[in-house]
Amino acid sequence: MRPRVRVGAVNYLNTKPLIYHLEALAPQAELSLDVPSRLADRLAAGELDVALIPVIEYFRGDGYSIVPDIAIATRGPVLSVTLFSRVPWAEIRSVALDEGSRTSSTLVQILLRERYSVQPAVRPLSLDAAAERSDTDAVLLIGDRAMKACLPGYRYAFDLGEEWANWTGLPFVFAVWAVRPGADLGGVESALLDAKVQGLENVGAIAEAEAGRLGLDAGFCRRYLETLLRFDLGTSELAGLTRYYDLAVRHGLAPAQRGIRFYRGVSALAGV
C-alpha cells in the first residue's frame, strides 16, 4: 500500500477553488490547513510532501519543484493583500508585517525600496494582534483578515496586486504548489489539477458556502474568486514570477541562482 501523501493548503477563501473535493479526488491525500508561513515551515521540515506555499518560500527552499499550471495569482487588484498606511508610500518609515505572510511581506519591501527609495524599519504583526492598535506608519494584512479589515485610523489602503500591476504591467503570483525533494505524489498532482478545474466550475457554490463562515456577502466572495483572482500558471504569470524573484535577489530577500523547476513524478522518472 502506498503511503499517504501529506498535502498542506491555506485556509483562506482564495484557496478553496484549488482544494475543491480534493480528498475525494485523491483518497491517498491527507489534507491539512494552516497559514502560509507555517505551511512553508512544515514543508521545509519534511512534515508535508506538497504544500501551497508563498512563492518566496519556493525560492528560499532547497530543491523544491512546482506542480505545473496552478497558482494563486492576480493581474490587478486582489483585495486580500493590503498595505494600510497613515502616510503616502514615500513617507513610510515603519511597517508591521502580517506574520502569516512572507511573499507579500517581501513584495512590500521591494516596492518601498525599489519604487519609492525608502527602507523603513519592519517588525512582525502577530496573527492575533489588533492591527488598528499598531503604532507603525503602515500595516500589511493578508487573506481573509485583509478583506474584512477597515482600519479607519489609516488614511491609505494600498492594494498590492494593483500596485504591482501598475508598476510592472505583469501578473503577480502569490502562491504555488511546491513539492519537497524526493517526494512521490503518486498521482496526487493530477488530482490537484482536477480539483482546480472542478473548483472553478463551482465558484458560486464555494462563495455561498464560505460567505457565512467569513461574515462576507456571497456575491462579493464570488466576484473576488471569479474576476480578481487567477489560478493558472501560464507564460505571463511566469514572467511576473521571474521579475519578482529577480527583484528579491537584488535586495537580498532571496538567494541567487534559484530557477523555476516543475514537478515530474518520482515513479515516472524511475520508469516505474
Image (tube, grey):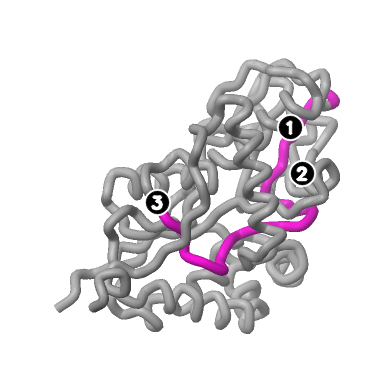
The picture places residue 20, in percent across and down from the top left corner, at 50, 76
Q: Is residue 113 magenta?
A: no
Label 3, on which residue? Answer: 64
Quarter of the figure with the N terminus: bottom left
Q: CB atoms at circles 1 and 2 under 8 Å apart?
A: yes
Residue beneath the point at 73% across and 54% down: 171
Reply above or below: 64 against 218: above
Give me the disc on residue 111: 1
Counting residues from the start of the chain, the first of labels 3 and 1 encountered is 3
The picture places residue 271, in percent across and down from the top left corner, at 26, 76
The picture places residue 29, in percent across and down from the top left corner, at 32, 72
In this rendering, the label closer to the viewer, 3 or 2: 3
Measured Cα–Cα span from mark 3 to mark 1: 26 Å
Counting residues from the start of the chain, the first of labels 3 and 2 encountered is 3
Is residue 202 visible in this depiction of the protein?
yes
Q: Secondary structure at mark 1?
A: helix
Residue range in magenta is: 65-88
